[in-house]
């Protein structure tokens, strides 16, 4: 037997939907022949987000990935999202992309405009 079939037929397997009885006003209607009512037993929700900037920059200037996506330094299977670092000059980068840049410098400055970097780190 296929392992996926074995898991589906095991007594521990929960179904996401259970059929429940239709209300009395639907008992005699033609709708009950074609329509079943369900109760949700289990639901996994997924949240989505998108970085919205007041400027036109929506991509990290270092890795060129969209700011709402993970950067190359982050683990894809990580539950923590990439932090976005925004300088007082208005340029935005993934925090993990810009950290190695700053580690090489005696005083951090923006990789684009060379202004002194005072970062506002935001969680997406």
Image: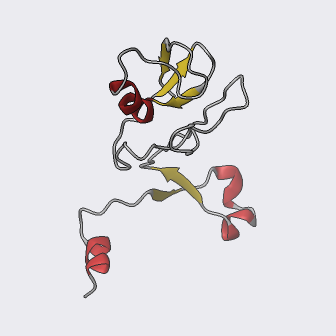
- The one nearer the camera, 58 or 50, is 58
The x, y position of residue 15, in whole percent, is 39, 61
Frontmost residue, 9 versus 47: 47
Residue 82: tell me if it is visible: no
Q: Name the quadrant containing residue 2.
A: bottom left
Q: Nearer the viewer, residue 50 or 67?
A: 67
Quadrant where the N terminus lies? bottom left
Residue 108 quadrant: top left
Is residue 9 shown above or below 27?
Answer: below
Q: Residue 95, how many percent across, how many down?
A: 43, 29
In front of the other: 87 or 113: 113
Question: Which residue is drawn at the image coordinates 56% and 37% (left, top)?
Answer: 60
Q: Residue furthest bottom?
A: 1
Image position of 83 with respect to 69: above or below: above
The answer to whether 97 appears left or right of 65 in the picture is left
Q: Is residue 28 visible?
A: yes
- Residue at image x 75%, y 67%? 30
In the rendered view, does 119 fall on the left or right side of 23?
A: left
> What colour-coding does the image apply?
secondary structure
User: Residue 97, percent across and down?
Assistant: 43, 36
Tell me residue 33's x, y (percent): 68, 70
Q: What residue is shown at x 29% (from left), y 74% (from top)?
A: 9
Establish if 18 lies above or below 105: below
The reply, left or right, for residue 62 in relation to residue 1 is right
Q: How many marks?
A: 0
């Amino acid at each position: 037997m296929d392992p996926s079939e074995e898991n589906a037929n095991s007594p521990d397997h929960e179904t996401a939907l259970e059929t429940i009885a239709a209300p009395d006003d639907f008992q005699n209607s033609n709708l009950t022949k074609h329509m079943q009512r369900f109760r949700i037993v289990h639901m996994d929700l997924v949240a989505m987000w998108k970085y919205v900037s007041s400027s036109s920059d929506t991509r990290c200037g270092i890795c060129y990935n969209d700011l709402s996506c993970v950067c190359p330094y982050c683990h894809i299977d990580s539950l923590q999202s990439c932090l976005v670092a925004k300088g007082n000059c208005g340029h935005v980068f993934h925090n993990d992309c810009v950290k190695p840049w700053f580690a090489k410098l005696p005083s951090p400055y923006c990789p684009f405009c060379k202004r002194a970097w005072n970062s506002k780190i935001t969680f997406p």
